[in-house]
Amino acid sequence: MRKTKTVYVCSECGASFPTWSGRCSSCGSWNTLVEDRPIKKSDGYQSINRNIPKPRPITHAKEEKHYERISTGIKTLDEALGGGIVTGQVILISGEPGIGKSTLLLQISSNIARGKKVLYITAEESSHQIYVRAERINALSPDLLVLAETNLEAIINVIEKEKPDFMVLDSVQTVYSSNLESAAGSVSQVREVSGKITEIAKSKGISTIIVGQVTKEGSIAGPKVLEHVVDTVAQFEGERGHAYRVLKIIKNRFGAAGEIAVFSMNDIGLQEVENPSSFFLSERPIGEAGSIIFPYTEGSKPVLIEIQALVSKTVYAVPQRKSQGIDINRLAIITAILEKEGNIFLKDRDIFVNVVGGMQIREPALDLPLALAIASSYMNKPVDEKLAAFGELGLTGEIRSVHYTEHRIKEAKRFGFEKILIPSSTDIQEEGVIKVKNIKEALKMLK
Ligand SMILES: Nc1ncnc2c1ncn2[C@@H]1O[C@H](COP(=O)(O)OP(=O)(O)OP(=O)(O)O)[C@@H](O)[C@H]1O
Ligand SMILES: [Mg+2]
């Protein structure tokens, strides 16, 4: 009997090796090689079109592509995507289990089904489960076709026969191709399924949303090629047990990245929140130390978000540093800057920081409000309730400029903030805007 060969595939870059090693020699990542079965020879990616294609001058490329955009029926989501979903666009949506991915996609599918043909492929749930959800969230529609199938080849046959205008694949990790020996969800299966679905979406002009599961650390499970192959990557974030859900556009080939759409979850599904700042500010404590407002943005729409810190005396030999929604390494840097430049001694203090609403914030403009929230809790002095702050902190305590300064100031003023701390290097002169050069100057606002 022929022995089945095993290969080791890097979950970051997809390179395969005959033996395991701790480090992928192709992309340099550590501990990313996982056991997999090789692709059958007969199924190698072959060039379908043997004619030699002719390149065209860029000036003549205009009339070739006309992007028609389909509305999702959710205004803020259309805006975040740059005006709706483009024909043939492939979007990957990922998020923690139970966050509401299937709910959102069913709502979108039912909205698009008012006028277009929609195919909802479910490889995780039965069609009855989808029916029950659709009934609850009022998404029943005769033009919304449901297919409960896990085999890629069967799915492709249905797509070719039905020729939908829009389709959803929930999820890429649960579909398998019979051409491969490995189990659904393995690196080679995910690569194969996403590649084939993208190919058919592009060739037939079907706008497609693929659901991707996330790993324990919160990143998209599967090889990095999954993110490269799709046009748009969106991440669904929020705290379970809370109503807020934020869909963040991380990559977009048909619009700006960094845009967000905010939703609130209730028993009839996800409702869009048109004014997220007032939503996030509604439960804010007034006059309490350790809380500050940060005008956050990675795209054109800023949102006012509350940042909280709790600094308390430690009972452990090594003080605790815990964070929700903030990179723990960034927290360590801010803590060190506060110690060195701000005379705030945190060696015997536990520090807990939190982004209210469950968002993950990676932008450096968070540094200044985070430092002020920690200092405020340490000194037990509340930050002025009409104060908002943003700016990146350098290692010598200097406050560096960040992008979208005007947008952030405008949003803070719209909500009645009268003191807005901004980096001093910007040339904005406005009432209520306070320029700060370094962390020492910023800390004076707490005294
Ligand atoms: N009857 C209900 N009333 C209110 N909310 C509900 C009800 N049923 C489900 N939900 C909400 O819907 C969420 C599940 O949503 P959904 O199945 O869309 O998540 P998902 O991201 O697709 O999860 P998974 O990764 O497991 O597929 C639950 O966590 C819950 O908050
Ligand atoms: Mg689901």
Image (cartoon, rainbow, N blue to C red):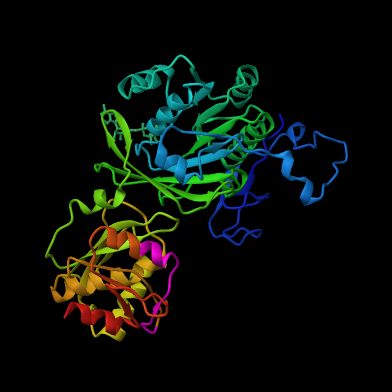
Looking at this view, is 300 or 148 the one in front? 300
Residue 317 visible in the picture: no
Residue 117 coordinates in the image, percent (x, y) = 54, 21
Q: Residue at x 19, y 51 (%)?
A: 282
Q: Is residue 382 above or below residue 109?
A: below
Q: Seen in the image, is 404 located left or right of residue 366?
A: right
Looking at this view, is 32 or 12 the one in front? 12
Q: Seen in the image, is 122 located left or right of residue 137?
A: right
Looking at this view, is 211 or 180 the one in front? 211
Looking at this view, is 240 or 8 the one in front? 240
Q: Seen in the image, is 65 located left or right of residue 23?
A: right
Residue 60 coordinates in the image, percent (x, y) = 79, 46
Q: Is residue 55 above or below residue 179?
A: below
Quadrant placement of the N terminus:
top right
Asked if residue 181 is among those painted magenta in the image, a careful observer would answer no
Q: Quadrant of ligand 1?
A: top left
Residue 9 coordinates in the image, percent (x, y) = 62, 48
Asked if residue 404 is among those painted magenta in the image, a careful observer would answer yes
Q: Residue at x 43, y 70 (%)?
A: 402
Residue 331 visible in the picture: yes
Task: Residue lying at the far top in this picture: please name it.
Answer: 142
Q: Is residue 409 above or below residue 91?
A: below
Part of the protein shown in magenta:
396-408
Q: Is residue 90 above or below residue 299?
A: above
Q: Residue at x 62, y 38 (%)?
A: 67
Q: How many numbered callouts?
A: 0
Quadrant placement of the C terminus:
bottom left
The quadrant where residue 133 appears: top left
Q: Residue at x 33, y 73 (%)?
A: 430
The quadrant where residue 265 appears: top left
Residue 285 coordinates in the image, percent (x, y) = 14, 58
